[in-house]
Amino acid sequence: MERTGGAAGRSVNSFPTHYLPESVRTIILKTMAAKTNGTKAAPDEGAEDILRAPLAMADRPKRTAPPSDGGREGTGTAVLTRTRTRKPNLYRVLLLNDDYTPMEFVVHVLERFFNKDRAEATRIMMHVHQNGVGECGIFTYEVAETKVTLVMDLARKHMHPLQCVMEKK
Ligand code: TYC
């Protein structure tokens, strides 16, 4: 009796890999071909490679829906996939000391744009005043860039020479 979903009589190409990234498909098909013709896949071509696959895999666009011929039944071959997530690059936002920006303005900047309370803002301002540079916070690229722009725009509007910069962590 013919069982649907069985491997018997099915070609390698009937395995539903159309929704997988090219790199995964290649590995699965190589593995299945090796099983079908009785040879062993080379160590660097086997399914384990999916687990060691470069991050580029995750960057490929993922297919959301199979084509209209529908998903075919499985062939008994396990499919190993792993999606990797990347930690975002982080940036320190720094204030630089100068001789002219009023201390109260720097405290205000720290409260307004970096959500510091008065005590913490004063501590950071004094640290910058005494050491030349100090950290306001750590953010992803776009957030850090926005904060630098907001600080610099407000400083220029009030004609203070305050400098705010970001540096990659
Ligand atoms: N040094 C400034 C003053 O004496 C105060 C100041 C602190 C300026 C921190 C900039 O980032 C700064 N008025």
Image: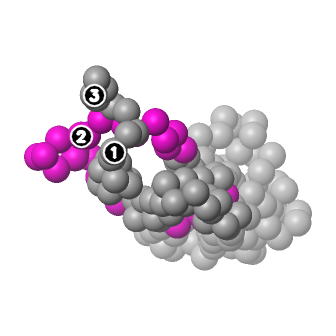
Q: Are marks 2 and 3 in contact (CB under 8 Å)?
A: no
Residue at 65% x, 40% y: name it: 116
Tag shown at residue 2 = 3
Residue 149: horizontal and vertical position, in percent? Answer: 48, 67
Q: Residues within 10 Å of mark 3 (few under 14, many from 20)?
A: few
Where residue 87 is drawn, which disc sits there?
Answer: none
Image quarter where the N terminus lies is top left
Is 106 or 92 nearer to us in this picture? 92
Residue at 33% in and 47% down: 10
- Report whether 25 appears left or right of 141: left
Q: CA distance from mark 2 to mark 1?
A: 18 Å
Q: Is residue 95 visible?
A: no
Name the outermost residue toward the front: 1
Q: Is mark 1 within 8 Å of ligand 1?
A: no
- The residue under label 3 is which amino acid type? Glu
Label 3: element kind: loop
Q: Nearer the viewer, residue 89 or 29?
A: 29
Q: Which residue is mark 1?
A: 9
| Secondary element at tag 1 | loop
Rendered position, 4 above or below 130? above
Provide the residue span drawn in magenta. Answer: 52-80
Report the number of discs. Answer: 3
Dot 2 surroundings within 10 Å: few (below 14), some, or many (20 or more)?
some
Alpha-carbon span between mark 1 and mark 3? 10 Å
Whichever of labels 2 and 3 marks the residue nearer the N terminus, that label is: 3
